[in-house]
Every structure is written in C-alpha cells, then in structure tokens.
Image (spheres, helix red, strand yellow):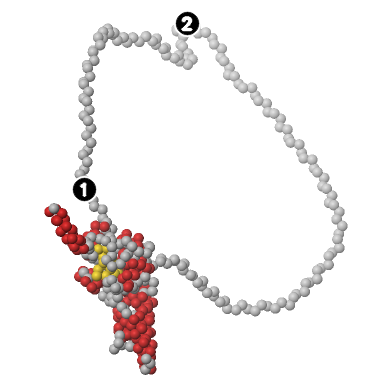
Amino acid sequence: MRRVLAALVVAPLVGLLAPADAHAGGGSHPYFNDGGTLVWYRSLDEARAAARASGKLIFIESGRYKCGSCRTLVSSILPSEPCRSRMSACAIGFADDCDASDPSCQALFAQNLPNATMLPLVGFVTADLRWVTGWYGSTTPDAVLAQVAAAERSRPRPVERLVARPPAPAPCDPPKPVAPPPAPRPTPNVTPRPTVPAPMPLAPKPVAPTPPPAPAERATPAPRGVPTPYVAPVEPRTAPPVRPEPVVPPPAPTPTPPRPAPFVAPYPPSPAPAPAPVPNRTLPPPPGPVTAMPPPVVVPPTIPSRPATALERARSASVREAWGDVLRAAEAPGVPPSDAVELAQLAERARAWVSRTMADAERAATERRLEEALRLLERVRRETEGTSLPAGIDAERGLRAVRALATMDAEAAKGSPTAETLRRQSYADFRGSRWAALFRAR
C-alpha cells in the first residue's frame, strides 16, 4: 500500500520536472518547423560542444516567434534543396531569442553586423566563436546558398590524431640444432712404393774432328830428287765473235699526187643592203630625285595575357573604389588559401563602404535631400548586384521608400488629403525596416 501511494505522489512531480529539461540537448527549432534540416540547441555552450565534437560550424538564428522573415528562413528556405543537404552537412543550429539574447551572440552581432536594422540576425561561427559570415533581414534561397558556400570554404577540417604505437618486437628465429662434429675418417693403410733412383745422364758420343778445308789449288812443292811431271799449259778460252746483223732501212713513203680542187662557178656580187630608217626617238626625261623607302613597321608579337586572379581583380577594384567588383571577386570559387586572408580584408572594406553609404542615404532621406539619397541608394544597388549581401534588397526597398516620400511631400505641398493616406500606406509597407521612420506621424 505504501509503494502505491509513493508512485502516485512521484508521478506528478516527474511530469512537472520534465519541461525544465526540454531545452537540454539538440532537437527541433523552438518556434518553427525546419523539416529536420538542422539539430537545434537552445544553449550556446551545448552548441559549441556539439560543433567541436562533430567538426561543424554553428548556424546562429536570432529572432522571435512573431517575425515573418524568421519564419520564412527556417520553414521555407532551409528545408528546400540543395540548401537542406548542404546546411545539415556543414553546421548545427543555435536558436537565439533576440528578446533574451545570449551575451556572446550580442557581442558577435554588434561587432560583425553593426548596422543591422531587421530580423533575423544570422551568422556562421566556429566552435571557438570565430565569425565566418552572416547577414540580417529577409533574404532569398540563392543568397543563402552563397553564404553556405562561404561557410563551407571556412569549415575547419578534422585533424587526424597520430597515436604513437610501441615498436613491434623483432621476430625471433628458433634456435637451429647444432650438428654433431663429423667422425674422423679412418686412415687408409697405404704401402709405400720402392724408391727408384734417378737415371744417370749419358756420356756424349765422341765426334770425329773435321779436317780443315784444303787450300785452293795450291802447288805442292815436289820433294827433292823426284822429277816433276810435265804439265802442258792450258790456253785461255775466248768467246766466239758475234757477227752483226745487217740493218734493213725502212721503206720510203710513196708520194701521193695532189687532188684537183672542185670547180666552183662564181656568183654575182650581192647588192648592198639599204640602210634601215632611223626612228625619231625622243630621249626619256631625266630621272627625278630618288625617294627613300620608309622603313618597315615591325609589329612586336602579341603575347597572350595571363588571366588575372581573384585577388588581383579585387586589388584593382579597390583602387578604383569599385566595391561591387571586390565583393564578386571575394565570392568567386577556387580561391587559393594563400590569397584568402587578403581577399577577406578587401571584402570587409567593401562591406564597410556599403554600410556607410546606406547610413548616408538614410540620413539624406530624413533631411529631405531626396536626390542625394536616390543617387546613393542606386549606387549601392548597382554595386551589390550579383553578390550575396542583403544590402542590395535593402537598397531597392530604400529606393521605393524615397520615391514614395517624394510623392507624399508633393501632395502635402498641394494641401491634398491624399498625403496622409500615402503616409499611412507607406508606413504599413515599410514597417520593420529602417525606412519606416520616414513615414511616422510628426
């Protein structure tokens, strides 16, 4: 019985305590339905922790429940493709109530959107609350996609943690078995061979002495008492005489009688040719002065110029104070990381010029310097055309407001009651913007 009573008492307390934790953790947007595009947080600290854990950016939307532009952004633009898939891949949401805003959000918007005059205040920041990009007021899907592209380029990339691993132990080879020493071989029983004496060298054979050559026909004296035989003298032989052959003279050439010359009849002498008539030739005029030819014109070869980079275009545009070209160059895709810092500084100067010019146009319209206000607003609209800045939309709204103010003043100068009707209609049309102050009742 006591357990039943305790359960009945604790159940209502649990129901009362449940709403207190409704804002803890991520969930849906507190005011509008974004179709599950983002996980929304109501606490900035929880949003920072989730962004740091997931490696994403924080998408801050500061507005209120009764803001029509806030409802359009969250319920219509964010759920549409491709904005839905790209937003959910790069960011988590933080819904900030502008009537009870977080102090950190107030400092971020005061520093980066100092001239904001319309809700919602929107920004992309990192987990360390470093500003990336943002805007204020009503916008279009294309402008939101341009802001998402800028946020994707600045999204922090997760760094892989290198964990030192202990070195793997070297593989150990199993000990090899030690082979036993080889057994000694038996010594063969070799019978020594008998020693054979080396042969003695043979004695050289005796060679008979060669007798000296006999002298060439040397008369040997006969011994005394021995008669010398008679040797008849030998007559020297002479060569037989050579008889000369008779020389036969060559035959004399036979003389050839001369041939008689052929008879040629004499021709009569030809008459002398008549002299040709000399034509009456007129001497050509003397040549005039020689005019020197002009030197040929040497055309240097045309070297194809290298296309300028986005940073070079932005530098040139900032010198010419063409701030729209600076903004378009800053939003161009494919900017190398080495140029991103200087390009962001030039884009910040362009956005500051837009803010100052819009403030000057509002002041001129308030002081009824309508021509100057129209000129300033027209330049802002022209410079921000094709960029993601919402100031272009605000400039077009300002042009309509200044023209309506001129019409109202003209009717008031005539004393027409239409002026009051125009004032009330214009105030209703421009309510919630900076231009509504021009049509307040005085």
Instruction: Examine the rendering and report whether any part of residue 74 can be seen.
Output: yes
Crowding around mark 1 (Cα neighbors within 10 Å: few <14, some 14 to 19, many 20+) is few
Q: Judge by depth and name the residue closer to the eye, 323 or 281.
A: 323
Image location of residue 400, percent across then percent down:
38, 81
**Residue 148: which quarter of the image?**
bottom left
Which residue shows up at 62% across the image and 22% down it? 239
Image location of residue 389, percent across then percent down:
34, 72
The disc at residue 57 is: none
Q: Judge by depth and name the residue closer to the eye, 336 or 280.
A: 336
**Residue 423: which quarter of the image?**
bottom left
Image location of residue 229, percent across then percent down:
52, 8
Q: Amino acid at mark 1?
A: Ala
Is 246 above or below relative to 90?
A: above
Question: Which residue is the extreme one toward the front?
Answer: 1
Image location of residue 314, percent across then percent down:
35, 71
Q: Judge by depth and name the residue closer to the eye, 338 or 344.
A: 344
Q: Judge by depth and name the residue closer to the eye, 418 or 412.
A: 418
| Local SS, label 1 | loop
Which residue shows up at 22% across the image and 28% down it? 176
Q: Is residue 257 left or right of residue 200?
A: right
Q: Amino acid at mark 2?
A: Val
| Local SS, label 2 | loop
**Residue 84: which quarter of the image?**
bottom left
The answer for how far apart the CA atoms under marks 2 and 1 are is: 140 Å
Q: Mark 2 or mark 1: name the one nearer the start of the chain.
A: 1
Q: Which residue is mark 2?
A: 226
Is 178 above or below relative to 154?
A: above
Q: Nearer the viewer, mark 2 or mark 1?
A: 1
Q: Which residue is mark 1?
A: 164
